[in-house]
């Protein structure tokens, strides 16, 4: 029996290394759920129009081009990006352990997480989860963090495995080996990351998955001495912790779920609008009581119409011949009546202001923007504590890896890390200054607090304090000089 640490709880698993169902779950696992995930990603990538297969590849191609050129038409991607951009961490801090915070910030910078975190957030908002896998670079003696997507049966490479009670058991990473010419070799690799061990498997050309030999593992990493590889601290008992850290969306669902229905309606409406716009320039003609023109074989001849061309038709019977165009629809009415309502529907589904999806509806008042974005800000803020827990877990695992593999003496428990986040509110400098001014007048705030609210860093505030002190000294010198009586001879 294997004991797996999952947060504050301990889950027990009866899975063994020879369990056939277990091995199959590594390779095939979550097929039905992954099929749903593929559909969500189609929508996110602007390929929702593929759902309209009856309309032909050409229309699907045009819509993909449109979504790439005008991303606001993609409600799913706009909605996910709106939240992801408001979740960014700007600094790693600690009030109880400044030394740990300094090292953590160095690791953050080394792994370039300032930019990579946005991919992490987009993945978890779209898929409900995303993963960072930590490793230790022996050459530089520094950590390496890589962001991974969930596997959907075609793209991505990670699966997250839970037991029947919903406890996290392990994370598996799946990939296909390629040769030096980037051609698939037929070997499927899977690595399973537990808190206390790492297991490496391979399946060759559709065969049953098997545990890799130590020699096969050492061909890639000479430091591996066993498979499964024990993943323990120097005491031989304490687990290092899973190097595959899962980041969850809160609530545990994809942010795309309530945007896909409005997106389908929007696609259909845009298609109607597109056709209506084309039709306004190329109208259909109606002929009443006219003799149909045919060629020598008796086949109908299309009417030839265009600028400067006369239309000659023969009447049929005693009724007069009439030729007239079908009136074009008002394209603007189609847009306002068919396209915009689906954008409104997306905003209502999310409880967000309409200007998130339609920037032309942005209020002129910054204070009104803040009031309307209240639900959006609350939705962003509720995600940050759960994200912070995953970041702390990643830093703790990395600290333990630094001790085990980097031979570094450092604190590994109770790091006390905290994070400075990008504000969830839309940045409006004029409104910020007005609000800060009101706070200063009402609360008589010191200059340092005003500067902090205005976004100045600690170093910038220190420099401003120096400028203020110099100005005060200069003013004092002038005052003293003016107070000295002038003696005249």
Image: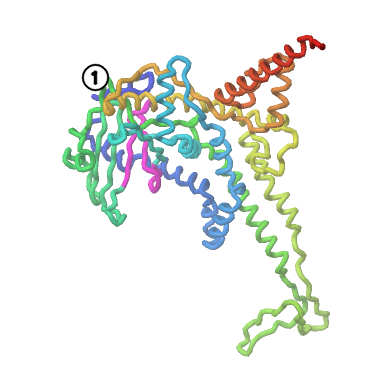
Image quarter of residue 434: top right
Residue at 77 percent across and 13 percent down: it is 482
Quickly name the residue at label 1. Answer: 237
Helix, strand, or loop for circle 1? loop
Q: Which residue is painted at 69% across and 47% down in the image?
A: 340
Q: Name the quadrant of the N terminus.
A: top left
Quarter residue 181 falls in: bottom left
In the drawing, does residue 458 fall left or right of residue 133?
Answer: right
Where is residue 98 drawn, in percent x and y?
44, 18
**x and y, in percent, of residue 123 in the image:** 47, 39
Outermost residue toward the front? 489
What is the number of callouts on the image? 1
Residue 33: say if magenta: no
Give the image location of residue 162, x and y in percent: 36, 30
Residue 150 sits above or below residue 42 on the image: above
Q: Quadrant of residue 326 in the image? A: bottom right
Q: Residue placed at 67% from the left, 41% from the top?
A: 344
Q: Which residues are magenta?
A: 151-175
Please report the residue visible at 70 percent of the width from the left and 65 percent of the height from the top.
Answer: 279
Residue 172 on the magenta segment: yes
Measured as percent of width and height from the top left, residue 282 is found at 70, 69
Relative to 469, is 117 on the left or the right?
left
Neighbour class for label 1 at 10 Å: few (<14), some, many (≥20)? few
- Specify whether 92 is left or right of 333: left
Q: Quadrant of the C terminus?
A: top right
Q: Identify the image's colour scheme: rainbow, by chain, secondary structure or one colour.
A: rainbow
Q: Nearer the viewer, residue 342 or 97?
A: 97
> Looking at the picture, does residue 380 appear above or below residue 98?
below
- Residue in the foreground of this view, choosing between 103 and 213: 103
């Amino acid at each position: 029996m294997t004991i797996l640490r999952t947060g504050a709880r301990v889950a027990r698993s009866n899975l063994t290394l020879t369990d056939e169902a277990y091995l199959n779950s590594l390779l095939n696992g979550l097929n039905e759920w992954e099929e749903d995930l593929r559909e969500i990603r189609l929508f996110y990538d602007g390929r929702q129009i593929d759902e309209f297969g009856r309309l032909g590849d050409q229309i699907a191609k045009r819509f993909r081009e449109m979504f790439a050129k005008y991303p606001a038409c993609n409600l799913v991607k706009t909605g996910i990006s709106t939240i992801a951009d408001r979740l960014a961490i700007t600094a790693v801090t600690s009030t109880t352990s400044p030394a740990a915070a300094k090292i953590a910030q160095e690791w953050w910078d080394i792994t370039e997480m300032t930019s990579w975190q946005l991919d992490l957030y987009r993945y978890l908002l779209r898929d409900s989860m995303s993963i960072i896998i930590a490793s230790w670079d022996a050459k530089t003696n520094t950590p390496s963090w890589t962001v991974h997507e969930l596997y959907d049966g075609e793209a991505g490479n990670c699966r997250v495995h839970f037991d029947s009670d919903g406890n996290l058991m392990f994370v598996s990473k799946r990939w296909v080996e390629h040769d030096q010419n980037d051609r698939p070799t037929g070997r499927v690799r899977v690595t399973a990351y537990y808190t206390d061990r790492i297991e490496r498997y391979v399946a060759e050309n559709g065969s049953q998955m098997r545990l890799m030999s130590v020699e096969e593992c050492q061909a890639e990493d000479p430091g591996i001495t066993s498979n499964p590889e024990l993943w323990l601290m120097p005491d031989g008992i304490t687990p290092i912790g899973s190097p595959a850290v899962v980041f969850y969306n809160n609530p545990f669902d994809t942010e795309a779920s309530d945007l896909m229905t409005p997106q389908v309606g929007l696609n259909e409406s845009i298609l109607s609008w597109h056709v209506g716009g084309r039709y306004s320039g190329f109208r259909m003609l109606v002929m009443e009581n006219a003799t149909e023109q045919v060629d020598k074989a008796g086949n109908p001849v299309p009417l030839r119409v265009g600028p400067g061309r006369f239309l000659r038709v023969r009447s049929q019977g005693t009724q007069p011949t009439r030729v007239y165009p079908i009136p074009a629809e008002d394209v603007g009415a189609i847009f306002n009546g068919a396209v915009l309502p689906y954008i409104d529907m997306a905003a209502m589904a999310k409880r967000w202001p309409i200007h998130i999806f339609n920037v032309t509806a942005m209020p002129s008042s910054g204070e009104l923007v803040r009031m309307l974005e209240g639900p959006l800000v609350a939705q962003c803020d509720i995600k940050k504590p759960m994200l912070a827990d995953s970041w702390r877990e990643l830093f703790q695992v990395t600290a333990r890896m630094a001790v085990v593999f980097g031979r570094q003496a450092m604190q590994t428990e109770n790091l006390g890390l905290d994070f400075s986040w990008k504000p969830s509110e839309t940045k409006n400098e004029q409104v910020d200054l007005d609000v800060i001014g009101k706070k200063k007048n009402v609360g008589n705030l010191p200059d340092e607090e005003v500067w902090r609210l205005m976004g100045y860093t600690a170093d910038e505030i220190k420099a401003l304090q120096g400028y203020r002190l110099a100005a005060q000294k200069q003013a004092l010198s002038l005052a003293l000089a003016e107070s000295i009586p002038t003696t005249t001879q």
